[in-house]
Amino acid sequence: MQDMRFSRYSGWARKGVSLLAAAAFAACGILDTEVENPNVVVQEDVEKPAAASALVGGALLFVTEGMGQLAAAHATVSDEATWRGSFDVIGAFDRGELQHNDNLYSTAGYTELTQGRWLADESVRILTEHDANGDLSDRSLLATAYWLAGLAKTTGAEVFEAFAKSDRRDAGGVVDRNSLFDEGIGDLGQAVSVAQSASADGLATAAMAYQARATTEDSRIGFEINSRREIVIENHIIQQSSDLRQSCWPGGDACSTDGIQLMDPIDDIQDPALQREAWTFLGSFIYPDFVGVSARELRLILAEAALAGGDMNTFATHINAVRGLEASLTAFDAGNPAH
């Protein structure tokens, strides 16, 4: 009886399902997936002038996330940070093993950066059309899109031996690094031109873009040093805690001493710029600012070029411009043997 009842119930259920399916197919068509979903964003929505800021914000998210991943890798490969945790792919970088093409930091950074590159280029394409039609209310958005595209391309050329420029699902070929550099430099030039024509300071636009990131995404290098503590700043720069997992600084929980180890070569005091920047970085936890380029770095590049050419006066000019950023430092004197 149980078998009969089950069999009769099953037959009724099958008939009901068949009727429902027939009704559904009659109404929608076989395998029709078209539904009304107010949350769906389609291409035509993205290309509306009102979506300009959101489009550029998406490019910002991917580019900065990729750069944060890669910064964590660079710091470990260099003498800036040391691996102390259990994450062996970071240990491989710390040991100088750069041949692995499946290292999480490089693969994750590549994925984010390539997505950011595409979205930045897409933003440039769409916003350029809006600008030509007079529909772009804030031209600094176009400058920012150019800036992000240039940043993604120049970073990709600096970091990776192979970089592909794909378009959505269409695979792209590997781009020559020199060509990628040239294209990125061209985008950065466009960013400057558009920003100037819009009476917007290019560096101010970049700074605002970085500030926007602090409301959207953390920084991978901040996470790995200040939260997970998989890597740590090198001991010759900042003293490490007894467990070798943290930097010593007044706001730390493992050692609150002033851990600045790097001394100024002229005044023989703790490097004031390092102290300020390091304490700001350590205190920002997983949301530290990411500096793409600084006046300090550019001055040092010019100083090195002058020194290589034997031009000590120009070298001193740029070195003192850097030292002048800190009120407490003595100027460099090329004629002083002690300097």
Image (cartoon, grey):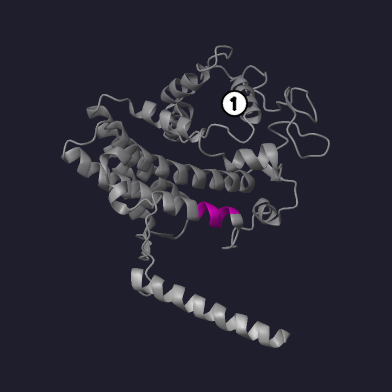
- Residue 235: name its quadrant: top right
Q: Quadrant of the N terminus?
A: bottom right
77 part of magenta stretch: no
Q: Residue furthest right?
A: 242
Percent coordinates x, y for residue 222 in the rendering? 62, 38
235 or 37, which lies in front? 37
Judge by depth and name the residue closer to the eye, 28 or 299. Answer: 28
Give the magenta-colored segment's residue range. 105-110
Q: Residue at x 58, y 20 (%)?
A: 339
Q: Residue at x 52, y 51 (%)?
A: 109
Q: In the image shown, does 163 or 21 lie closer to the viewer?
A: 21
Q: Is residue 311 left or right of residue 187?
A: right
- Residue at figure coordinates x 38%, y 26% from the top left: 204
**What residue is drawn where x is 33% and y is 53%?**
42
Q: Is residue 13 above or below residue 337?
A: below
Vertical relation: 143 (above or below) 124: above
Measured as percent of width and height from the top left, residue 85 is found at 75, 48
Q: Secondary structure at mark 1?
A: helix
The answer to whether any part of residue 132 appears in the image is yes
Residue annotated with mark 1: 277
Question: In the figure, is residue 172 to the left or right of 223?
Answer: left
**Residue 5 image offset from top left, x and y in percent:** 67, 83
Q: Is residue 157 visible?
A: no
Q: Single out the residue that lies furthest toward the left.
A: 133
Which kind of residue does numbered mark 1 sit on? Glu
Residue nearest the viewer, comparing 296 with 169:
169
Residue 119 vertical placement versus 301 (above, below)? below
What is the crowding at mark 1: few (fewer than 14 residues within 10 Å), some, or many (at least 20)? few
Position of residue 190 measured from the top left corner of the image (x, y, whole percent): 27, 39
* Main secondary-structure element of the magenta-colored stretch: helix
Magenta span has 108? yes
Question: On the rendered structure, is 310 left or right of 233?
Answer: left
